[in-house]
């Protein structure tokens, strides 16, 4: 057994696949963690990201799989999960070891795992499109701080860009420490200190922003809370279902829920 | 100023909440000229504590109404606070909520003040202002006011994404009893107007590409369930007829929530709404729309009501033992879809996976089939050769005993004294 360690990028993962075929090593663990625990007799190999190798592997995948499967591959990669990485790696081996297309064989554990991870990441993407709440700042910027389970900002960028074209907005991922900012022309990637913006970040209670907000922000914030209360039908109260749909970990980012 | 708008929003949102239509999907309106908003497959931005989704800003324009329908909160004989928005207020609320990503768009309904046309004309003003002045491309769902003129309905259709008009009661007799001022014929006339225009615009678009969009997300309707003595057969056949005749996108079923003290023939205040029945109706609705079931297969003269203990798909399977077991490695997709415990996603995966080899039990479980339920109706590669044939009643008992319905309340082991 060997353990391949890569730098966490897609290029790195595909380079691992390249190396596996180069050295005919097919019993491999892949990891992003440099200090991963490995077995006594295992080889621990740092795989260097190689753009050219990665391109060759990706071209191969493009030939052997449908565009739907390529999308699944990318979604699964964004889950940033150790098990998912391993499935991606094994999936590549499985695809390349067959002369015919096998990317729709849902009886195979790795193909099925990709479909299931895609579902999870897709669900998180959809949640972010729904649960992001903008606050309007004094300078007209619409600001939102979130902490998605997976790295979904690259996936939701297109949705928000298509929707909000006449306002500047910023969605910041406080866990992965980067945000996407739209300046009325294009979307840029930016970094900032989330702790300075949100004073409650460390304590985990509902967000409270230090930035000067628009004078009407409080009114609409309140109106939304009122609306949320008014549309509830008391006779049908079902908290279990409510929490299933809006898990508590998102509550502090949504102004209608307060904790 | 802000206090008054808060009060209005509370009154008019509260009055609109009994309309269950919530979807924001089905339209294809795209953002144009760097404006605000687009539509897609629909997003639920939040969920209320009763577990229903909040997708659109669902409000009445006014809750003043000239009608006196017994099942409605806004009926003229009811003593509630009355309010009405101005056009500008609705526009501001929609734009500001949308900009903060609170909503997918606007759902505008109204009590009928003065006349149907007068009300409809005010609502049209809101919609036109949003579309033409504010360049708002989000979703707009407009309620058609029964009895509004054909011209005004056609004009509204050019700006909105979806229109709907409620049948209210599943039977004409129910409507006669509780809303004598309304008839199904009037509702069907309005549904017909929009349907005919939809077909006309579609035909014209084949010749000229620049024909404007007309109600791109289609029409829906809603029926109140459990207020009158209608059977499930009445409701399902009514829904089926409207799906076929009026090309409706959805029929919503709303379990009646008691709100009327005076009318003694309606369920009393405090009685629980028929949630389980509503759930079974939606399940049958899905079976008709996505699983290829016919309305007559789900309910007939012998079984006018749906079984509350088991879902309609399982009930159908138990009534038709001659159709089972289904061999998953050979049967066609249509039949796999009819197996209880296998949904659309799983059925598609099975059909794709069996091209690479025989399907085994463990694969089914991993694919996501509810195997405990499905096992009685299927055969796959490693099903034991000799298994005892079971009667439908035995299968039914086994399935009922293996799970617990979320609707049955568990008895507490503690002694209850009733206070």
Image: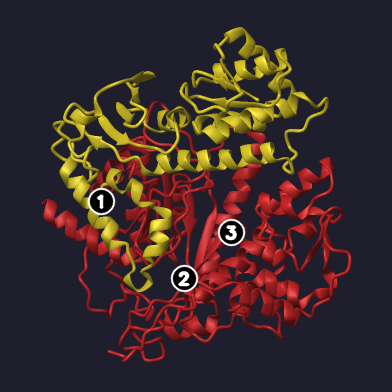
Q: Is residue B126 left or right of residue B253?
A: left
- Determine which residue is flagged by label 3: B248
From the image, state whether disc 3 or disc 1 is nearer to you. Answer: 1
Instruction: Tell me the shade of chain B.
Output: red
Q: Identify which residue, A128 or A166, lies in the foreground.
A: A128
Q: State the residue position of label 1.
A: A224
Confirm or deny contact between disc 2 and disc 1 (CB under 8 A). no
A27 sits to left or right of A163: right
Q: Which chain is yellow?
A: A
Q: Chain of mark 3?
A: B
Image location of residue A143, percent across then percent down? 27, 32
Disc 2: which residue: B254
Q: CA distance from mark 2 to mark 3?
A: 17 Å
Query: Mark 1, residues whose alpha carbon is within 10 Å: few (<14), some, or many (≥20)?
Result: many
Residue A239 point in image, percent of width and height: 36, 64
Residue B357 vs residue B184, the one in the foreground: B357
Q: How is the image coloured?
A: by chain
Relative to A143, does residue B162 appear above or below in the rendering?
below
Which residue occupies the foreground of this view, A181 or B381?
Answer: B381
Distance, label 2 to label 1, CA atoms, is 25 Å
Q: Earlier in the sequence, mark 2 or mark 3?
A: 3
- Residue B370 in sight in this render: yes
Please give the label number shown on residue B151: none
Q: Chain of mark 1?
A: A
């Amino acid at each position: 057994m060997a353990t391949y360690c890569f730098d966490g990028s897609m290029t790195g993962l595909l380079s691992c696949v390249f190396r596996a075929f180069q050295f005919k090593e097919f019993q491999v663990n892949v990891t992003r963690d440099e200090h991963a625990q490995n077995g006594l007799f295992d080889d621990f190999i740092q795989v260097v990201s190689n753009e050219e190798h990665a391109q060759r592997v990706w071209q191969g995948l493009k030939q052997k799989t449908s565009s739907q499967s390529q999308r699944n591959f990318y979604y699964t990669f964004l889950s940033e999960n150790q098990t998912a990485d391993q499935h991606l790696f094994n999936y590549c081996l499985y695809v390349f070891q067959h002369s015919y297309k096998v990317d729709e064989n849902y009886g195979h554990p790795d193909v099925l795992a990709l479909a299931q991870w895609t579902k999870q990441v897709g669900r998180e993407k959809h949640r972010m499109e729904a649960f992001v709440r903008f606050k309007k700042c004094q300078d007209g910027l619409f600001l939102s701080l979130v902490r998605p389970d997976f790295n979904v900002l690259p996936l939701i960028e297109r949705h928000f860009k298509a929707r909000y074209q006449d306002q500047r907005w910023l969605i910041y991922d406080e866990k992965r420490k980067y945000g996407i900012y739209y300046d009325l022309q294009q979307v840029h990637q930016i970094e900032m200190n989330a702790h300075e913006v949100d004073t409650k970040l460390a304590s985990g209670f509902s967000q409270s922003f230090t930035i000067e907000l628009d004078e009407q922000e409080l009114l609409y914030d309140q109106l939304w809370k009122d609306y949320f209360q008014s549309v509830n039908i008391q006779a049908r109260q079902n908290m279990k279902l409510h929490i299933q749909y809006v898990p508590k970990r998102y509550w502090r980012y949504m102004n209608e829920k307060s904790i | 100023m802000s206090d008054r708008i808060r009060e209005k929003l509370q009154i008019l949102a509260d009055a609109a909440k009994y309309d269950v239509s919530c979807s924001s999907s089905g339209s294809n309106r795209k953002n144009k000229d760097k404006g605000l908003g687009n539509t897609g497959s629909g997003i639920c931005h939040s969920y209320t504590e009763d577990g229903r989704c909040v997708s659109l800003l669902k409000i009445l324009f006014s809750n003043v109404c000239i009608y006196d329908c017994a099942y409605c909160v806004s009926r003229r004989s009811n003593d509630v606070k009355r309010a009405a928005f101005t056009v500008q207020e609705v526009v501001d609320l929609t734009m500001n909520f949308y900009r903060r990503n609170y909503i997918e768009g606007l759902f505008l309904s109204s009590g009928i003040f003065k006349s149907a046309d007068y009300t409809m004309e005010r609502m049209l003003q809101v919609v036109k202002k949003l579309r033409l002045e504010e360049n708002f491309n989000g979703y707009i769902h407009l309620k058609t006011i029964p009895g509004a003129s054909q011209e005004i309905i056609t004009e509204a259709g050019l700006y909105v994404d979806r229109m709907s008009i409620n049948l209210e009661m599943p039977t004409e007799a129910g409507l006669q009893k509780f809303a004598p001022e309304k008839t199904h014929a009037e509702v069907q006339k309005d549904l017909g107007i929009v349907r005919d225009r939809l077909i006309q615009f579609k035909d014209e678009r084949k010749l000229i590409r620049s024909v404007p969009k007309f109600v791109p997300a289609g029409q829906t309707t809603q029926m109140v369930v459990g207020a009158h003595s209608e059977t499930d057969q009445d409701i399902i056949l009514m829904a089926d007829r409207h799906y076929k005749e009026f090309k409706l996108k959805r029929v919503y079923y709303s379990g009646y929530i008691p709100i009327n003290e005076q009318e003694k023939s309606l369920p009393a205040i405090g009685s629980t709404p028929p949630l389980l029945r509503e759930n079974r109706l939606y399940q049958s609705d899905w079976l008709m729309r996505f699983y290829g079931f016919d309305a007559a297969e789900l309910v007939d003269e012998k079984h006018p009501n749906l079984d509350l203990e088991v879902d309609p798909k399982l009930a159908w399977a138990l009534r038709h033992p001659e159709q089972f077991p289904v061999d998953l490695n050979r049967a066609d997709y249509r039949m796999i879809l009819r197996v209880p415990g296998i949904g659309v996603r799983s059925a598609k995966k099975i059909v794709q996976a069996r091209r690479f080899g025989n399907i085994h039990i463990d694969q089914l479980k991993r694919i996501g089939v509810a195997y405990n339920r499905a096992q009685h109706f299927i055969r796959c590669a490693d099903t034991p050769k000799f298994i005892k044939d079971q009667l439908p009643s035995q299968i039914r008992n086994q399935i009922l005993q293996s799970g617990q319905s979320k609707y049955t309340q568990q008895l507490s082991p503690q002694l209850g004294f009733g206070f």
